[in-house]
Image: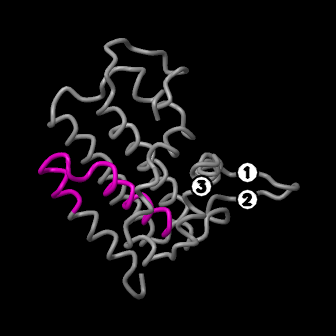
Amino acid sequence: MDAAVSIGEQAFASSAEFNLACEHVVRLLKDASLLFHAGSHASAAFMAVTAIEEIAKAHIGSFRKSSQPVARSKDPLFRHSAKHTLALGPTVAMGGRLQGAIGERRMLELLDAGHAEEFVRLRESALYISSKSGKVIAPAQAVPEQLARELILLAIEAFDDGLVGYTERSMALGDETDELFAGLVAPNT
């Protein structure tokens, strides 16, 4: 995390810009939820992983101190795996809501997967047709419904942990994502 904070320019010049980033993340989460409920689980998973990446950019970008721009190739906020690790910090696991929804063991497995670059492969398999052992695998086959649901819940929890509370708008957006979370853990969803 130190490298991500110490290099690159600060992401936002105002709370309005931070709020815009939060609104973008919530739009991704809402889209993921809509896709999930419509049965498009691979696309929902892709959107959830993308939301996790944007959470890291908004959170870490807020704390940057450098006034010097940095090349994208040297900026951790432009590497998928780094963003997954940054957004899925240890405090994501501290609340009880996610554990209650998917279980502590599964939550820890997902956090480990995010830190082990498995989300990079997952986001690609959620978007692109691939071939394994001579068999073509479509995204719909690569991402089961349960995994898509868990990823959206994880992304919502990461949003709540990383961005909610810095502004009044982020608090209101947190209420919206709380509703999304509840809609994904309710029976028959």
The quarter holding residue 186 reads bottom left
Q: What x and y, as percent, mark residue 42?
A: 55, 61
Q: CA distance from mark 3 to mark 2?
A: 10 Å
Instruction: Read off the residue under disc 2.
Output: 137
Q: CA distance from mark 1 to mark 3?
A: 10 Å
The amino acid marked with disc number 3 is Ala
Instruction: Read off the residue under disc 1.
Output: 130
Q: At 42% across and 70% down in the image, what residue appears?
A: 98
Q: At 48% across and 69% down in the image, what residue appears?
A: 149
Disc assigned to residue 126? 3
Q: Which residues are magenta?
A: 149-174
Foreground pick, 35 / 186: 186
Q: Secondary structure at mark 2?
A: strand
The amino acid marked with disc number 1 is Ser
Query: Mark 3 near mark 2, Cβ–Cβ under 8 Å?
Result: no
Q: How is the image coloured?
A: one colour
Question: Mark 1 or mark 2: which comes first in sequence?
Answer: 1
As drawn, the residue found furthest toward the left would be 168
Q: Are there few (<14), some (14-19), or many (20+) residues within 10 Å of tag 3? A: many
Q: Is residue 83 left or right of residue 126?
A: left
Q: Is residue 53 left or right of residue 23?
A: right
The quarter holding residue 57 reads top left
Q: Is residue 21 magenta?
A: no
Query: Mark 1 near mark 3, Cβ–Cβ under 8 Å?
Result: no
